[in-house]
Image: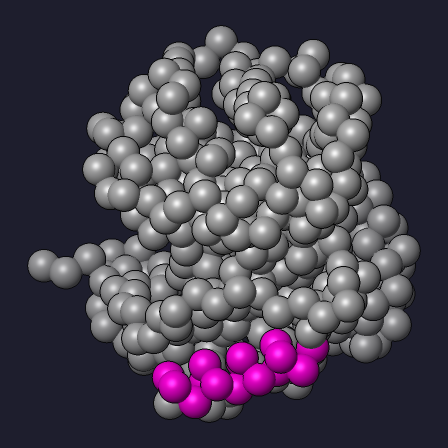
């Protein structure tokens, strides 16, 4: 007997613009309900289009908007997909590309081009780490359920680290450790450019080289040794390494590993991770600085460090070089249950709502009133997560919670168009919404989205409803 009953087929799209390359993925999935619990989910994903990675286009030190527009239009044409057909889409700009001053505006532009974009983010290290873990080793982590895993997604600009167990990310970090902070004329170690982090590293190592000058072998080794030491510090939880001036500059989001955990197994993804596994599998890599950076050298340096590659032949993740775009396309979109409370469908989509509180469904009146007061400080709406701790509330508990919410909303008297979103894990959205609005007598713009799994994040986006189902995406993951 199948666990899920088939439903409508929907299209999902992800775009990842990184320090070195840009990727696209379009997949089809089924909106299905579990035959016992009734919980809705996106099931049986199937990749329909996977464009070849291309170099991220830059022009005068910023991302080339015209070139990005052309790329997106070409990809959609090649896939024979129109923006109106998409159930959900996501755009993320990562690494050094996210440091360009037009990065977030460009993410918004790309989101407009693909239509129903749930995520349009730049420079969100926690989200990038979560996406890379889910796109590369979530299945591996679920299969080896008792083995903690730390995925290092190493690209041109950043190393996005995510620690997980049983397919769930429990800690994440982001550090400016990457292959493209120093750029070279392909085929040589003659510098052609460097990021602020590359310059700081050379200064730290007392290497006074600038663009146009060659790094000698000892200087190159010193750079690679520092990167390997930084990766080892991440893996071991050595916080002292990142307390130095260079360490603090490098650290965008600290990785706080759980204390007293068994020895963690390492996996790799990103462009450098892809090169590492290719090397370990016996493949000959391209020649010196083939990509104009240290990607190949860094992969080979990792391969020479026993602690970093101890598990690399036993645990090989999928989608290594494309982990982020796979995670963005196939894992970042949640869907509501069909019992949501949405009396005004025209209120959606909603973007960039802060999640101002995470409360128990059994929260007190004082806790709810304090959370609502905080929510009202957000001019364009807010979201409250109401968690049940694995125990779905009974009808009396729902009535009690609804009465408390109704009283709090009546006292607060929010503007009629101001949206308040409640996120629930159980399929009780419609019932709770009716109690909280006194069965429609309240004028407040309350939306209750149910059957959404708990995610530790700062913001939420809600997409356009499709057959009474709402796509949901989180960002600002912590």
Which residue is depicted at the point 25% across and 65% down? 44
Q: Nearer the viewer, residue 41 or 269?
A: 269
Q: Is residue 80 left or right of residue 416?
A: left
Magenta stretch: includes residue 68: yes
Please tell me whether the stretch drawn in magenta is mainly helix, strand or loop: helix
At which x and y percent is residue 254? 67, 29
Q: Is residue 339 left or right of residue 458?
A: left
Height in image: 264 above or below 397?
above
At which x and y percent is residue 55? 53, 65
Q: Which residues are magenta?
A: 65-79
Q: Nearer the viewer, residue 399 or 211?
A: 211
Location of the C terminus by quadrant is: top right
At which x and y percent is residue 386? 61, 47
Q: Is residue 188 left or right of residue 276?
A: right
Height in image: 176 above or below 244?
below
Height in image: 40 above or below 415?
above
Which residue is depicted at the point 82% across and 54% down? 375
Q: Is residue 327 visible?
A: no
Which residue is depicted at the point 37% across and 48% down? 286
Indicate how the structure is coloured in the image. Answer: one colour
Q: Is residue 368 left or right of residue 143?
A: right
Height in image: 164 above or below 309?
below
At which x and y percent is residue 201? 72, 29
Which residue is depicted at the point 69% across and 12% down? 240
């Amino acid at each position: 007997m199948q666990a899920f009953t088939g439903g409508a087929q929907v299209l999902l799209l992800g775009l990842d613009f990184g320090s070195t390359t840009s990727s696209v993925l379009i997949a089809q999935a089924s909106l299905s309900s579990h035959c016992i619990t009734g919980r809705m989910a996106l099931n049986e994903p199937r990749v329909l289009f996977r464009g070849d990675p291309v170099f991220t286009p830059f022009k005068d030190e910023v991302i080339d908007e015209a070139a990005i527009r052309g790329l997106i239009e070409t990809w959609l044409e090649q896939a024979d997909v129109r923006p109106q057909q998409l159930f959900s889409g996501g755009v993320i700009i990562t690494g050094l590309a996210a440091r360009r001053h037009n990065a977030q505006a460009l993410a918004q532009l790309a989101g407009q081009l693909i239509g129903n974009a749930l995520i349009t983010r730049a420079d969100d290290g926690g989200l990038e780490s979560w996406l890379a873990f889910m796109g590369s080793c979530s299945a591996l982590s679920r299969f080896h359920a008792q083995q903690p895993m730390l995925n290092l997604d190493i690209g041109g600009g950043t190393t996005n680290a995510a620690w997980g167990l049983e397919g769930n990310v429990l800690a994440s970090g982001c550090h400016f450790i990457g292959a493209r902070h120093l750029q070279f004329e392909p085929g040589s170690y003659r510098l052609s450019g460097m990021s602020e982090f590359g310059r700081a590293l050379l200064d730290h190592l007392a290497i006074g080289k600038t663009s146009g000058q060659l790094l000698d072998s000892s200087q190159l080794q010193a750079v690679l040794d520092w990167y390997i030491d930084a990766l080892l510090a991440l893996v071991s939880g050595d916080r002292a390494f990142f307390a130095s001036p260079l360490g603090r500059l490098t650290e965008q989001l600290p990785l706080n590993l759980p204390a007293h955990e068994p020895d963690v197994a390492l996996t790799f993804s990103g462009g450098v991770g892809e090169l590492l596994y290719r090397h370990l599998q016996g493949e000959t890599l391209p020649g010196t600085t083939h990509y104009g950076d240290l990607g190949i050298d860094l992969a080979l340096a990792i391969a020479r460090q026993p602690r970093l590659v101890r598990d690399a032949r036993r645990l090989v993740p999928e989608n290594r070089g494309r982990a982020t775009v796979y995670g963005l396309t196939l894992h970042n979109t949640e869907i509501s249950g069909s019992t949501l409370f949405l009396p005004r469908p025209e209120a959606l989509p909603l973007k960039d709502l802060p999640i101002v509180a995470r409360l128990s469904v059994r929260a007190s009146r004082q806790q709810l009133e304090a959370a609502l007061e905080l929510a009202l400080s957000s001019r364009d709406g807010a979201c409250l997560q109401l968690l049940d701790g694995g125990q779905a509330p009974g009808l009396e508990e729902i009535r009690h919670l609804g009465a408390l919410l109704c009283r709090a909303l009546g006292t607060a008297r929010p503007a009629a168009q101001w949206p308040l979103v409640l996120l629930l894990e159980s399929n009780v959205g419609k019932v709770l919404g009716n109690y909280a609005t006194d069965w429609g007598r309240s004028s407040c713009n309350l939306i209750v989205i149910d059957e959404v799994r708990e995610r530790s994040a700062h913001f939420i986006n809600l997409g356009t409803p499709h057959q009474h189902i709402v796509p949901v995406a989180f960002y600002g993951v912590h």
